[in-house]
Structures are given as C-alpha cells and as structure tokens.
Image (cartoon, helix red, strand yellow):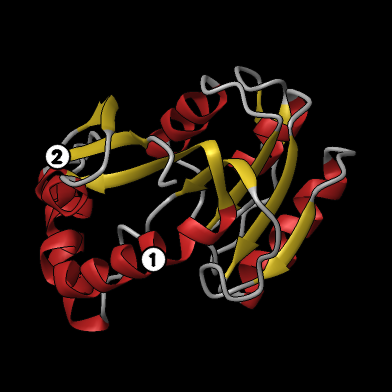
Amino acid sequence: MKYNDFNNIVLENSSDVCSAGKDTFALAECAACTNPKTALDLGAGTGFIAIYLASKGIKCVASDISDESVELAKKNILKNNLKIDCIKSDLFESISGKFDLIVFNTPLVQINPSFTPISRYVRKLFPNGVPLIPTLAFMSQSKKRKKILERFMSGAREHCHEKSVMVLLIHKMELRLFSKYKTEIMNYYGDFRIIKIMSLK
C-alpha cells in the first residue's frame, strides 16, 4: 500500500501485525514536529513511524517485541530504501544509546479471544471507524497497560538526555500516570491523547 500523504511510503501489511491507522498517522506527524535528529520507535509494528521519520532525514531505530512485526518492519524498510536499525526488544531490554525522541505507539487493542465477539458487534453498530473498539479494549486491558507504561517510564530515563522528548498515544484516563512530568497534549483521537513528555533528566 502506498501512502501519498506521507512521503509516498510503501508498506506491506500482514494479518499478524496491526496495520497503520489514523492514530498511527497522527502519532507520526506529532513525532516529526519535535524536530529530532535521532529517534527510537518502540512498538514499531509495520515500521510506519520509523520509516516516516527516516524519510525526513532522522536517524531511527525501530523495535518491537513481536518477531512477526520485526520481520515485517525490516521488509518495509527495504521497500522504502531506508537505513533503519530494526531489532526485537521488550521495551528497552535490547536498546542501547540515547535519543532525541522516543515514540511509543502503546498497544491499544490487545484483545483477548473472549473480547473478539464484542468487538465484532460494536463494529457492526459503528462501521465508520469511531474509536470505540480501542476504548473497549483499553477498559479490558487497563491494568496490563498501566504496568507497560510504568515499565516504559522507568526504562526511558536511561535513553534520554537533557533535551529528549517522548511522544506517546495513551487513553485520557492514563494522563494521571504522567502527572509528575512536564507534559503537553499534542493531538486528540477519540478518548485517546497523543502526549509529549519533556526530558526526564
């Protein structure tokens, strides 16, 4: 698939990896607005955000916990003739170095099998892409997401310098988890917010 509005990026998609959607596009644009020289894309999925940033001349590292995502992202990086390090990592586990920007497309729709029939029903009621599915998924996964976000913030400190920023997509109810940091809401996506967190140093 070709994304004409995003520097003509070409992506291959897979049923095993969540495709780039409106939330991903918004996150990529917000991330690019921070004007970094170096960036880390955590939870890279198809690699869209890292590829978009690299197409703007930003030196990127892309990572994901999923083998399928890493392999797909590597294919997509090659398709776009870009040089991006792409590695498997559970958050910062296999990451080294410091970055001007850390982007985290938090896992919104980790829906367990019992939740799938509900999601199908809601999709029938709201076919126009109203972001209710991510909201319902958030409600079913909020405790797990809280742990992931806490781990993210704990690990991010080691990979930031004084002027580093982080850009995340989170649910509005998760804003309180970041109350002790200097944050700015960059964009809205239904009940979700794209936030920028200033340096942790």
Residue nearest the observer in this picture, 191 or 17: 191
Task: State which quadrant residue 85 falls in.
Answer: bottom right
Q: Which mark is residue 191?
A: 2
Residue at 56%, 73% (x, y): give it.
65
Picture coordinates of residue 105, whole percent (x, y): 43, 50
Seen at 26% across and 43% down, the residue is 181
Contact between labelled residues 1 and 2, with CB atoms less than 8 Å apart = no
> Which is more toward the observer, 138 or 9?
138
Disc 1 element: helix
Up/down of 50 relative to 52, above or below = below
The N terminus sits in image quarter? top right
As displayed, is residue 75 above or below residue 130? Answer: below
Dot 1 amino acid type: Ser
Observer able to see residue 171 = yes
Which numbered disc, 2 or 1, marks the residue that appears first in the sequence?
1
Asked if residue 192 lies left or right of residue 83, the reply is left
Exactly how many numbered labels are in the figure? 2
- Residue 37: % across, % down: 71, 30
Mark 1 residue crowding within 10 angstroms, few (<14) / some (14–19) / many (20+): few
For label 1, the residue is: 154
Up/down of 164 relative to 116, above or below: above
Q: How far apart are marks 2 and 1 (CA)?
A: 25 Å
Residue 121 as seen in the image, left or right of residue 3: left
Kind of residue indicated by mark 2: Asp
Along the viewing direction, whichever of 49 and 80 lies nearer the viewer: 49
Measured as percent of width and height from the top left, residue 58 is found at 74, 31
Give the residue at x 75% y 60%: 86
Write the residue at 13% across / 43% down: 172
Looking at the rendered structure, the secondary structure element under dot 2 is loop
The residue carrying pointer 2 sits among few (fewer than 14), some (14 to 19) or many (20 or more) residues within 10 Å by Cα, namely some
